[in-house]
């Protein structure tokens, strides 16, 4: 970035700026700097969300907080350990353990954290917490995050496909349904989707119900038509337009796959498609 110069070119001469002129130009220059910085931040956000399929989170230990430390540590394992170490250094006793539970709750669904470490952390707090209160909080956090929908009846959804036709989840209950949460901007989602046609052929007992979390249905429609995907792909919308959907699934990271049996019970939750598991469904 060039430094701010106190002289301005006037024809072929350099002249000294007046105080008022310098102040005006500095204000303009500052506005440009702010504008360019905002552009860089937006570009960085788009790159990271595309690469990781990750959404920002308003919690204390949010996406920005976590990814900064993971990048500096150069691995998910080292980054996760670093955050835990920082919390342990900053806080004492009960407050430390409360903060560790908060970190687990905020960051568990991020793809850039080491889930094995977080699971060991919350298991340890649930079993060996400082007191019974901490143990209960840790146990409740574990259940609310890892098993929030598992073994529960799925809510019935009805969303429009690329042609505007409503497709309800219950209309597919003669099969085992795999609900997919995805978006056209999500790199990992786009990587997994080409596997779906083959999986549908592999097991006739299953069907997919892919819910787009894009901002507009046009993006979904163009993507579906370009790739000639034929299974039920519907438009759910982004968080602003469909807060109910986002809160129900507690959307933090995508893609996410919920397997629902013929009775409407969620029997599996996963971050990617597992061919052997899908092949075994009957």
Image: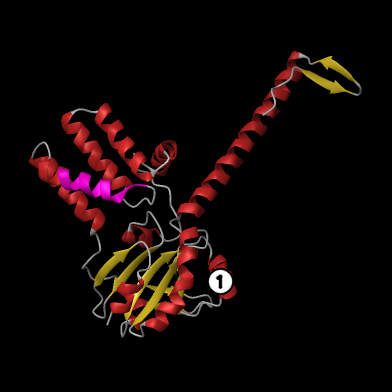
* Along the viewing direction, whichever of 154 and 269 lies nearer the viewer: 269
Q: Is residue 254 above or below residue 64?
A: below
Residue 159 in the image: x percent, y percent? 43, 73
In the image, taking residue 3 as reference, residue 14 lies left or right, namely: right
Residue at 48% over, 62% down: 183
Residue 45 in the image: x percent, y percent? 52, 46
The image quadrant that residue 66 belongs to is top left
Q: Is residue 122 magenta?
A: yes
The image quadrant that residue 249 belongs to is bottom left
Residue at 54% over, 73% down: 224
Q: Which image quarter is the C terminus in?
A: bottom left
Residue range highlighted in magenta: 113-124
Q: Is residue 79 above or below residue 278?
A: above
Which residue is situated farthest in the left direction here?
A: 132
* Along the viewing direction, whichever of 188 and 100 lies nearer the viewer: 188
Residue at 28% over, 78% down: 280
- Main secondary structure of the magenta stretch: helix
Q: Is residue 218 visible?
A: yes
Q: Which image quarter is the N terminus in?
A: top right
Q: Is residue 173 magenta?
A: no
Name the residue that disc number 1 marks.
221
């Amino acid at each position: 970035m060039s430094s701010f110069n106190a002289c301005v070119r006037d024809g072929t001469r350099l002249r000294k700026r007046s105080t008022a002129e310098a102040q005006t130009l500095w204000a303009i220059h500052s506005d440009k700097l702010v504008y360019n910085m905002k552009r860089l931040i937006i570009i960085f956000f788009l790159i990271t969300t595309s690469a990781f399929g990750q959404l920002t989170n308003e919690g204390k230990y949010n996406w920005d907080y976590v990814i900064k430390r993971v990048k500096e540590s150069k691995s998910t394992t080292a980054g996760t350990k670093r955050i835990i170490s920082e919390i342990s250094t900053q806080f004492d006793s009960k407050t430390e353990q409360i903060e560790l539970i908060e970190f687990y709750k905020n960051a568990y669904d991020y793809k850039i954290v080491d889930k094995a470490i977080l699971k060991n952390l919350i298991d340890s707090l649930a079993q060996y917490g400082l007191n019974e209160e901490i143990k209960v909080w840790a146990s409740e956090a574990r259940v609310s995050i890892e098993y929030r929908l598992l073994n529960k009846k799925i809510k019935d959804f009805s969303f429009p496909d690329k042609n505007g036709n409503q497709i309800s989840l219950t209309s597919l209950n003669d099969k085992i349904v795999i609900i997919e949460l995805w978006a056209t901007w999500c790199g990992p989602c786009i990587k997994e989707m080409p596997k779906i046609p083959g999986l549908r052929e592999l097991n006739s007992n299953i069907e997919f119900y892919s819910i787009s979390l894009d901002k507009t249905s046009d993006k979904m429609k163009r993507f579906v038509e370009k790739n000639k995907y034929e299974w039920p792909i519907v438009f759910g919308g982004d968080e602003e337009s469909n807060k109910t959907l986002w809160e129900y699934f507690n959307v933090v990271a995508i893609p996410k796959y919920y397997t629902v049996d013929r009775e409407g019970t969620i029997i599996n939750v996963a971050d990617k498609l597992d061919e052997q598991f899908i092949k075994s469904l009957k």
